[in-house]
Image: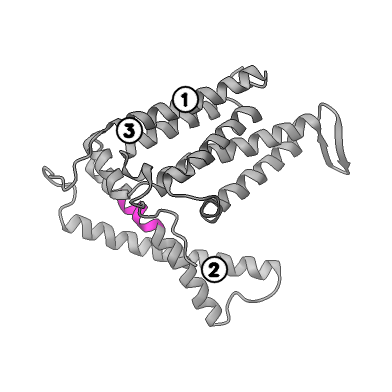
Amino acid sequence: MSVDIIATPRSTAWLAHANPLAKLGAGLTLTLVLLISVDWVSASVALILECAVLPLAGLSLRMLLLRGWPILLAAIVGGYGTALLAPKTGELIVAWGPIIFTSDSIEAGIAIALRGMAIALPGIIVLASTDPTDLADALAQKLRLPHRFVLGALAAMRLVGLLVAEWQTLGMARRARGVGGEPGLLRGLKAQLGQAMALLIQAVRRATRLAVTMEAKGFGAGPRTWARVSTYSRQDLWIVSGGVAMAAVSVSAAVVLETWNPVFG
């Protein structure tokens, strides 16, 4: 089953009808708070609140795992590495040769893993509930960004879903030719690298054709008109306020439980 990373927003999703800049502002506010602190309480509270927002974006936990499993895996690996390399203070938990875990190092690893997931989840929510064209309109009309930058970002977002589909197509084509089905970790890794190289070549070719086509059609040249006007509404105010409130609750919980650990402290 094909699952697009960037999907067309559902008409029933509440966040799908909001201005993309409001969603970006709320997500960046929460992300900034998580970036300046390394503690498991603020990250846990933020992650719980973000999961509560998933239905507003038309997402379920199953869909989140299908879309964001690489981020989840990266967060777990990062947490393990942190726990392995952190100072070995506190109560000794595991001592197996060079692998040593203590209560403090495990807490640091959990904090980093939760922090990574909490930082990444707002991005998934924004992408899943935002049409790329609406985002491009907001960037050009509200932020007055250069047309070339906006159109390039729009093209990139549109191509991400195509790259996912092409990866699946390349995999099926290679298996049909008997490539990539060999047993063994090294052979499997070699096959994946070959498929990634083929996908990279396809992406470069597609980007080149798209750039030439957009240039030929005069994108970014002269004054523009807009088919859809980007506007703000009361809903956008609620979204930004919600992001600020989630950030405040996360920080307050860490401060009250005395786990607040700012990176600059």
Label number found at residue 47: none
Residue 98 image-quadrant placement:
top right
The secondary element bearing badge 2 is classed as: helix
Nearer to us: label 2 or label 1: 1
Residue range (magenta): 154-160
In the displayed structure, 253 sits above or below 180; it is: above
Kind of residue sitting beneath label 1: Ala
- Between 146 and 242, the one nearer to me in the picture: 242
Name the residue that disc number 1 marks. Answer: 245
Residue 263 visible, this orientation: no
**Residue 161 in magenta stretch:** no
Residue 84 appears in the rendering: yes
Q: Residue visible at 61% across and 68% down?
A: 190
Task: Answer whether labels 3 and 1 touch (C-beta < 8 Å).
Answer: no
Question: How far across and how far down the image is residue 138, in percent?
Answer: 26, 39
Amino acid type, label 3: Asp
| Residue at figure coordinates x 43%, y 43% from the top left | 56
Q: Amino acid at mark 2?
A: Gly
Circle 3 is placed at which residue position?
A: 236
